[in-house]
């Protein structure tokens, strides 16, 4: 939260915001603003894990818009050759920035591409928390056993715009009106009682506790002092030379 408030106590000292949060201790190696780059960074991390013989597994997240980038195919090919412990996780939410799925993907299922590289591909209901969990768990177990990568395509729906204030004119009027009908959290709440045995009262308690944690974090971050202006010169490795008269 401090990072989102641009405070020095943030993961990236308040300089990355929501796009560049990293927490290496928690296994979050860092987000980036380059489309598809998660897969390139992911195979680097997976190779490190393999060389060190560690039990970890990398999960590289990307959207269907990034699935056609050159780095996607290079990374998947390399991961297959070296049997790297990585899960390529595609969040196929029907829109890449402003472009519908059908305008830039030639297949119905992106997971079908995995067969070209010789490793498993699976399409799951991305709005079903439990289906996603089962798929990722199986892929992780396979990777830890030396079976190499898996491509998981989670079909879902982007009911929020690409950016704040996005009018979403590329969607139909019905889609714009009923987008939240695809909310996976609401769907999970409707099924968690049967699957996990949680009562409505216990679920409400969990939500209340989570809300309190979030509000506490926001209040804490809001109360922090902003970094001094002199911090602008920190971590700058090159400066342009200025001629003097």
Image (tube, rainbow, N blue to C red):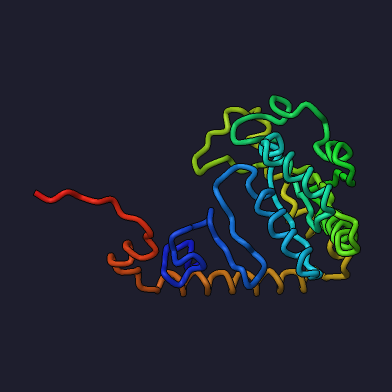
**Coordinates of residue 125 in the picture (x, y in percent):** 83, 46
**Total count of labels:** 0
**Coordinates of residue 158 in the picture (x, y in percent):** 67, 42
Answer above or below: position of 71 versus 174: below
On screen, residue 165 versus residue 98, left or right, reads left
Answer above or below: position of 168 versus 164: above
Would residue 204 be seen by someone viewing this image from the given angle?
yes
On screen, residue 153 versus residue 180, left or right, reads right
Give me the residue at 52% from left, 72% from top.
217
Give me the residue at 56% from left, 51% from top.
32
Q: Quadrant of residue 156?
A: top right
Would residue 190 be seen by someone viewing this image from the given angle?
no
**Coordinates of residue 120 in the picture (x, y in percent):** 89, 46
For this rendering, which residue is in front, 25 or 183?
25
Give me the residue at 79% from left, 53% from top.
87
Q: Quadrant of residue 42?
A: bottom right
On screen, residue 39 versus residue 98, left or right, reads right
């Amino acid at each position: 939260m401090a990072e989102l408030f641009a405070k020095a106590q943030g993961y990236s000292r308040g300089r990355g915001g929501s796009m560049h949060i990293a927490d290496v201790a928690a296994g979050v190696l860092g987000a980036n603003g380059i489309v598809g780059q998660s897969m390139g960074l992911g195979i680097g991390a997976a190779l490190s894990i393999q060389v060190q013989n560690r039990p970890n597994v990398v999960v590289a997240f990307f959207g269907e818009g990034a699935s056609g980038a050159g780095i996607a195919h290079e990374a998947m090919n390399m991961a297959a050759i070296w049997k790297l412990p990585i899960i390529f996780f595609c969040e196929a939410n029907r829109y890449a920035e402003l472009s519908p799925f059908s305008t830039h993907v030639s297949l119905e299922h992106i997971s079908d591409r995995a067969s070209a590289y010789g490793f498993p591909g699976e399409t799951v209901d991305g709005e079903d928390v439990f289906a996603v969990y089962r798929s990722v768990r199986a892929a992780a177990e396979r990777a830890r056993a030396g079976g190499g990568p898996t491509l998981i395509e989670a079909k879902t729906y982007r009911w929020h715009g690409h950016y704040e204030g996005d009018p979403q004119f590329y969607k139909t009027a019905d889609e714009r009106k009923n987008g939240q009908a695809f909310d996976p959290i609401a769907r999970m709440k409707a099924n968690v009682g049967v699957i996990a045995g949680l009562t409505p009262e216990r679920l409400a308690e969990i939500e209340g506790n989570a809300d309190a944690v979030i509000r506490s974090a926001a209040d804490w971050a809001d109360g922090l002092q902003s970094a001094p202006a002199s911090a602008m010169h920190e971590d700058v490795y090159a400066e342009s030379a200025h001629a003097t008269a």
